[in-house]
Every structure is written in C-alpha cells, then in structure tokens.
C-alpha cells in the first residue's frame, strides 16, 4: 500500500506513478482504511517537505505501532538538491521516530515549485526565509520556478519494492 501527503501535487504524482508501476492501492494519509493497512505486506510512505518538516510526520506518529510491524519504504519529495545528502537525511532524522528509522528504506525525489501556485502565506514565508538567510544561490532558488518531477525518479524505489513483492 502507498500512503502519501503533500502540499502542491508532486508527492501525489509520484504516488500515482508508484501505484501504477507496482499495482498497489494508494491513499492520501488519513483516507486509508484499517483493513487496507492490516492487509498490506509493506507500506510505501511518501511525503513532501514543508519548512523542514515532513507533511507525513503526524500520520507516522499516529500509526507508529502498526508501522513497526511492516516493511517500510519512505520517499521524500523536496526542493533540496539530491547531492545535499546531509540535509535530506536530517529531514528523516528530525521527523521520523527513532524506533522506525532503522526499519525504513529511504528514497529522495526532486520536487517542483510554481511560485504563482503557492498560497499567499507560503509566498510570504518563502520570501522571508530567503531574505533572512541572505542571497545565496540556494535561497534564490527557493523563489524561482522549477519542476524536476519525473517518472524516472521512481525507478530505484520500484525495483526495491518489486523485489519485496517477489520475496
């Protein structure tokens, strides 16, 4: 089963592609049924990052006991460059309970930013954050549209989960 939570559509798109590739049901976090969770041999969780926090953080905490009994995969969607491994792993460390971290196989997917599609609040927060942190290339990138969402990004996770299905 695939559980996801995102804010502007990239995480949902990845969940749909994964569900199709692996022939698994997908549900937005909180919309899954108890039976779906109970029947799942493994769970693929997908979350976008918003201001350093996984959107799925609360759902993971609320389902901690259930998740502890399953094989787990996590894909994290963000604007953080994939070569910034320290920051990406910090997202997991800061948002996933310690007792689950060793059970989760993590994958990081690039996201997108369409500044015009952001809520007023998110536009203000991004501008403030960029202003507070100076004019570095990374901070300027936070205010520039980009879209790195691509079906090919799911390949490693599909292969890992497909192996799980066979095993």
Image (cartoon, grey):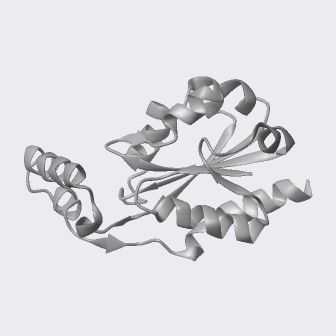
Which of these two is toward me, 63 or 157? Answer: 63
Q: Compared with residue 128, is residue 81 higher up or lower down, i.e. above or below?
A: below
- Is 46 on the left or on the right of 54, as rendered? right
Residue 19 position in % (x across, y down): 71, 64
Residue ID at (75%, 51%)? 1
Depth check, front residue: 145 or 98: 145
Nearest the viewer among 163 and 43 is: 43
Q: Position of residue 78 (x, y in %)?
A: 41, 56
Q: Residue at x 83, y 54 (%)?
A: 164
In which quadrant of the rendered view does residue 69 lie? Answer: top right
- For residue 83, what is the image quadrant? bottom left
Which residue is depicted at the point 21% across and 68% down? 144
Residue at x-position 66% and y-position 27%? 64
* Residue 53 position in % (x across, y down): 39, 39
Q: State whether residue 53 is above or below residue 10.
A: above
Q: Viewed as shown, does residue 1 lie left or right of 45?
A: right
């Amino acid at each position: 089963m695939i559980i996801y939570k995102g804010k502007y559509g990239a995480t949902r798109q990845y969940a749909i592609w994964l569900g199709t590739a692996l022939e698994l049901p997908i549900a937005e976090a909180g919309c899954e049924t108890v039976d779906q969770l109970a029947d799942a041999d493994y769970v693929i969780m997908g979350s976008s990052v918003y201001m350093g926090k996984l959107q799925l953080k609360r759902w993971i905490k609320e389902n901690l006991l259930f998740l502890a009994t399953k094989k787990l995969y996590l894909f994290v969607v963000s604007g953080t460059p994939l070569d910034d491994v320290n920051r990406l792993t910090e997202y997991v460390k800061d948002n996933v309970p310690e007792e689950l971290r060793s059970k989760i196989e993590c994958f990081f997917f690039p996201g997108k930013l369409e500044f015009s599609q952001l809520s007023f609040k998110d536009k203000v927060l991004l501008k403030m954050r960029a202003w507070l942190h100076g004019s570095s290339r990374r901070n300027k990138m936070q205010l520039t549209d980009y879209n790195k969402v691509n079906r090919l990004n799911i390949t490693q996770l599909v292969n890992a989960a497909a192996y799980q299905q066979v095993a």
